[in-house]
Image (cartoon, rainbow, N blue to C red):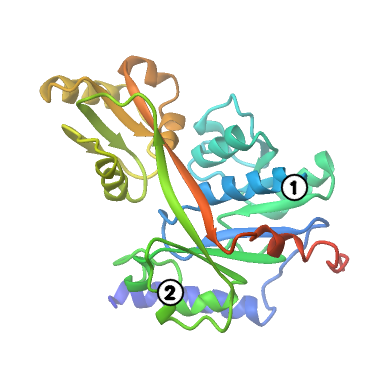
Amino acid sequence: MTVLGRVYGAAVGTRNHLYDRGLLPVRRLAGPVVSVGNISAGGAGKTPFVILLGELLKQRGVSFDVLSRGYGRATRGVRLVNPNGSAEEFGDEPLLIGRRLDCPVVVGESRYQGGLFAEQRFGPQLHILDDGFQHRALARDLDIVLLTPEDLKDSMLPAGRLREPLHSLSRADVMVMSGESEASTLHFSGKPIWRIRRDIEISGSPDLPVVFCGIARPKRFVDQLRSKGIKPVAEKFYRDHHAYSESDIDDLLRLKTQSNADGFMTTEKDVVNLGPHISRLGTTAIAKVTMEIIDPPEPLDAVLQFIPNRKPQA
């Protein structure tokens, strides 16, 4: 571990210790809270999992909202996401969640204040706390943590991608494992492990596409495309949550001409960040991330079982 990694790890450990000892305040909402998070800096599939969880809740007729920080937005304070709005207003992932689930999504630096706002508008229904594992200021009733095979071999920020050490997983109630992971080699004290399968859906792919994206793990995206028989003639990667500009579009069009491509391919998240700029690109195929839980067969029962017996707010 690097010196900076040790410093970062010490700061994280101190913060967690203060919460564990009750020395930092934790506030509780009237409605139950299910947190979806991870221990690495992006790429574990939190947003697709939140969407999957929301779809399962809707199938059961359970009313819910989503609470998010709204990372990357230019605004501040508590806001109800307008699905017709922009990533600049609400953040790309909350906007994508709102469009896919057609449910209330509230962004705010304080997820507690966001939850109070949601309960005033929609009642004390179930709250899905997006990217909530490290947001310990809000009490949660169930902590779901996504873990990738890469996380098991990674190191702490800034040298690696881990926001917390692996032993922090002791706080989780449920582990969600993607890929052919090595979870069986770890001991999670009998915690339930859900297995998920990730895939992408593509419609109308160009024969010779320029592939571009601004996501946490672009190589994984390209590998998925190649597994579908799609062969990019050029690639362009941006930082996660990248907000596209006119000059970016000029660069992409120039790359298309230079590589003799016949169109573009990008992710659903990037479409949110492109906004109206996408019209300049012409033929653009969109890859939509899909996710399913393959084991256990009825995981939602574990999410719902605590609701009827939930202790009233103190």
In percent of the image, x 72 and y 66: which residue is there?
A: 141
Label 1 environment density (alpha carbons within 10 Å; few <14, some 14–19, many ≥20): few
In percent of the image, x 49 and y 58: which residue is there?
A: 196
Label 2 environment density (alpha carbons within 10 Å; few <14, some 14–19, many ≥20): some
In percent of the image, x 52 and y 80: which residue is there?
A: 188
Quadrant of res 8: bottom left
Figure quadrant of the N terminus: bottom left
Q: Residue 134, percent across and down? A: 55, 64
Residue 94's place in the image compared with 285, above or below, is below
Q: Amino acid at mark 1?
A: Arg
Tell me if I can see residue 139 in this picture: no
Judging depth in this view, the residue of 232 and 69 nearest the camera is: 232
Residue occupied by mark 2: 183
Q: Secondary structure at mark 1?
A: loop
Q: Residue 125, percent across and down? A: 80, 49
Q: How many marks?
A: 2
Figure quadrant of the C terminus: bottom right
Q: Amino acid at mark 2?
A: Ala
Q: Which mark is residue 232?
A: none
Judging depth in this view, the residue of 16 and 290 nearest the camera is: 290
Q: Left or right of 15: which side holds 118?
A: right
Residue occupied by mark 1: 60
Give the CA distance from mark 2 to mark 1. Answer: 30 Å
Quadrant of res 81: top right
In percent of the image, x 77 and y 62: which residue is there?
A: 28
